Amino acid sequence: MEDNPVLLAELRPNREQPYEWKASCETWGVAFSPDGTWFAWSQGHGIIKLIPWPLEEDLLRPQGYSQCFKVKEVKGHGSLKEKTLDCGRIVWSLAFGSSSTKTGWKLWPRSWHQDVGPPGTLLLLATGLSDGYVKVWNVHTGRVLFNLTGHKDVVRDLSFSTNGSLILVSASRDKTLRVWDLKKDGKMLQVLSGHIQWVYCCSISPDCSMLCSAAGEDSVLLWSMRSYTLIRKLEGHRNSVISCDFSPDSALLVTASFDTTMIMWDPYTGEKLREFLNAEPQLSSLRSVCFSPEGLYLASLADDRFLRVWLLDVEDPVSVAPVTNGLCCTFFPHGGILATGNRDGYVQFWTAPRVLSSLRHLCRKALRCFLTTYQVLALPIPGKMKDFLTYRTNL
């Protein structure tokens, strides 16, 4: 077992809320911006904190300290300042999106240029609310750019495309997913129907070819991001699937369920590659799962109050840490840190494995970013190498 995660810092809401508001104090979402310069924290009661990253040095304890440094508020540093976004409703989901000058700047109305910022710096934060609205904010100014309407119930999850196209997918308790094009004034491109229960999670693959959606069902759906049609249904869980995430090279998909298992799939073939058992079913319904930025680790949060870190090819977790009432988790995009949010509106930062990827893995990752499983299997190379490139075995 590797070194267990060490708690580096804990952030709390800067004021206590009245007792009757306790039901809306949960931190349902935490996220780092793609470039690692901002951290977004849904601290409950409709409030989002946008915090410049990294935190000030005196807020992060060096590795080896057993206690965290608890803070009431975080000050900005450098040219970036902390922002408070009041969404007016309970925030159930959030996601960062970005676009470069070449891919989208000219499509924004001229009247918005002063709100968006100088060309080449477009960074957005989408927030999914309890009333079915999706508010999209300009991170640099803290202003609302869009109020997207269409959902009839809680917007439970959001996912941006990573290619700068500013395509946003929202998942809702109204049992649908909706695809929005923010470059076309937030136009709704498609409504995806197919689930018969609340949709809990959605994830666009890093290569922007697929969309995974998970609902209160024992299966997940894979959609094409090109035609917005259903590709296949993945069946294997025995209870509601609550969370899903693609690997950085899009070659793998992991799903987590209330049945306490995580399943790693090949999204191209629908094959179940591995299954990870979290703990005893009566104690540990899973809440969240995510891939590390280099694609060698998974992190999971469960109701048994533990954060677990897993290697892709090892059945048991390699490190464990106690997390009280954890709801969501995410890795810092450059590695080394994990963030978790809990039911009390807190967010905690943990050490995460720092790994120097092997040349073999880097080659596999580079190839799988543009080759599907079927294309790999068609290559004139030895079978063992094909197994390695498709994550069937270690080489």
Image (cartoon, rainbow, N blue to C red):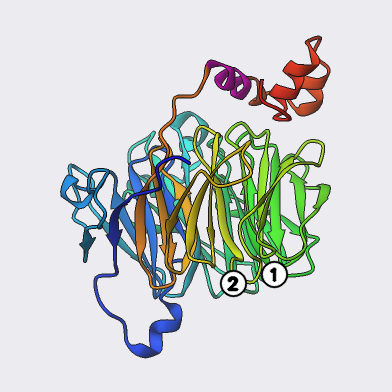
Q: Which residue is mark 2?
A: 154
Please report whichever mark, 1 or 2, sits nearer to the chain's N-terminal start: 2
- In the orientation shown, which residue stands out farthest toward the top? 380
Amino acid, disc 1: Trp
User: Is 145 situated left or right of 302 in this image?
Assistant: left
Amino acid, disc 2: Val
Label 2 residue SS: loop
Seen at 26% across and 54% down, the residue is 66
Q: Are marks 1 and 2 in contact (CB under 8 Å)?
A: yes
User: Is 71 situated left or right of 342 in this image?
Assistant: left
Question: Which of the two residues, 27 or 296, is positioned nearer the viewer here?
Answer: 296
Q: Which residue is mark 1?
A: 198
Q: Which residues are magenta?
A: 359-366
Where does the image place residue 165, in percent across and percent down from the top left?
57, 38
- In the orientation shown, which residue stands out farthest toward the front? 1
Seen at 76% across and 18% down, the residue is 384
Q: Between tags 1 and 2, which lies in front?
A: 1
Q: Main secondary structure of the magenta part?
A: helix
Q: Is residue 127 visible?
A: no
Where does the image place residue 298, in percent across and percent down from the top left?
55, 44
